[in-house]
Amino acid sequence: MNDPTTLSRLQFAFTIAYHYLFPQLTMGLALLIVVLKSLYLIRREELLNKSVRFWTRIFAITFVMGVVTGIPMEFQFGTNWAQFSTYAGNIIAQTLAMEGAFAFFLESAFLGLLLFGERTFGQKVHWFSAVMVWLGTWASGAFIITTNAWMQHPVGYRLLPDGRGAEISDYWAVLTNSWVYPQYMHTMSGAVVTGAFAMAGVGAYYMLTRSHEEFARIFLTVGVIVGFVASFFQLFPSGDLEGRQVTDHQPAKLAAMEGLFYTERGAGIVILGQPDMERLRLDNPLIVPRVLSFLTYRRWTAEVTGLTHFPRSDWPDNVPLLYFSYHVMVGLGTFFIAIMGLALLLLVWKRRLFTTSWMLWLLMLATPFPFIANTAGWFTTELGRQPWIIYGLLKTSDGASPQLSSGNVLFTLIGFAGMYALMWMLYTVLMVQHILRGPASEDEEDLAAEALTS
């Protein structure tokens, strides 16, 4: 722990994991708000419009938290990762600047209109602002994913003559990187799962407490339907495409994720097991034969390369953490399909979902787990790229700031932990108060806001 590079990695992992708790919710809620507003324009049921206002408030509070916690990460490129910034700044600065200049301003500008412009500009403009917030939020995700995709699979670049960095040779190749599409689809559908579980969880809470039941039915219906579709989309096609590109471009990562230490024909997929790094084996394995070969190469007897095939220096530097992160993500994703599938069955079967208390409890208690699954998914993505910060071009150990001391990093890490703990308490209080007040109070709040801005 005295290595400043290791501490810098830990600090960045902490700040980005904390930060991503908020964007995954806003990216998911943005789509759901558009769904609710579109249903209102079709049906003209005021409950739907009040639901839009309720979830827009939650979106806005979460959006602010995401902005505040996102700023320190970009500063870390200069403070902790100066050599990486020097090497790749000519490329990643382009996509990060586009995220700030286009996507962020689009969503923030129209969020104000979504919050305060309904009575002034009318319902069609209000719907349009919801769509723009959704597009801005998802465009922001697209530019961030494009940046990360270049680090995973660098394309469209040329090395500078002095060998100290890279610059863009084909801008469109960077934007249309083949790594982007599967990762973007998987990330966005994961965010929709988070938003859908949050909406269904709040609806389940209201139904169990016999409060705001008319809104609870809307939240449960929209959350369960969208949640089931998004959960299944996580598995196929987006998860399948992600797995195929890892197989093609990062085979050592695949082997570590699956706990496959030795090359096998007809390799099985591991359901349970614990990696033993001393004996290079899995303890207590539960394996389904040949499935891994089929999923990766579409042949039951295909050969899958094991981890020992690669030089030890090219192994991910924390194989057990990568292995468990991947299995937490996949395991929870499988449960999400089962939970939402069962809830959907109860919903369409004489609408018994609203009166089945054990299912309502399950939906409410499951609300935090998509946050865990998405975090585990990003851990899988980033741990699997190691020991490279730019895959195949720049090692992580060569990207850190050379003059940074471990004491400096530890000081800021502790500072971030304390500050973020206070922010989380504030966010929790605001969310609890808003949910306890419920959607019925939205009209009074909107009238007061209109009066203040007039």
Image (spheres, helix red, strand yellow):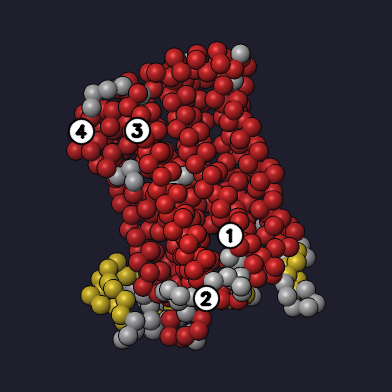
Q: CA distance from mark 2 to mark 1?
A: 19 Å
Query: Where, quadrant-wise, is the C terminus in this rendering?
Result: top right
Name the quadrant containing residue 358: top left
Which x, y percent locates residue 160?
A: 78, 73
- Is the C-beta separation of discs 4 and 3 under 8 Å? no
The residue tagged 1 is 76
Q: Whole-percent x and y of residue 266?
A: 37, 77
What amino acid type is highlighted by mark number 1?
Answer: Gln
Q: Is residue 84 visible?
A: no
Residue that badge 4 annotates: 356
Between marks 4 and 3 in the image, the one whose residue lies nearer the viewer: 3
Real-space Cα separation, disc 4 to disc 3, in angstroms: 24 Å
Name the image quarter holding the N terminus. bottom left
Q: In the displayed structure, would residue 62 be above or below residue 57?
A: below
In the rendered image, which residue does mark 3 sit on? 432
Q: Is residue 253 above or below residue 439?
A: below
C-alpha distance separating marks 1 and 3:
32 Å
- CA gap between label 1 and label 4 equals 49 Å
Q: Kindly check if marks 1 and 4 are in contact, taking CB atoms under 8 A apart as contact.
A: no
The residue under label 2 is: 387
Q: Which comes before the other along the chain, label 4 or label 3?
A: 4
Point out the tag, 3 or 2, that comes first from the N-terminus.
Answer: 2
**Badge 3 element:** helix
Identified by mark 2, the residue type is Pro
Closer to the chain start, of discs 2 and 4, is 4
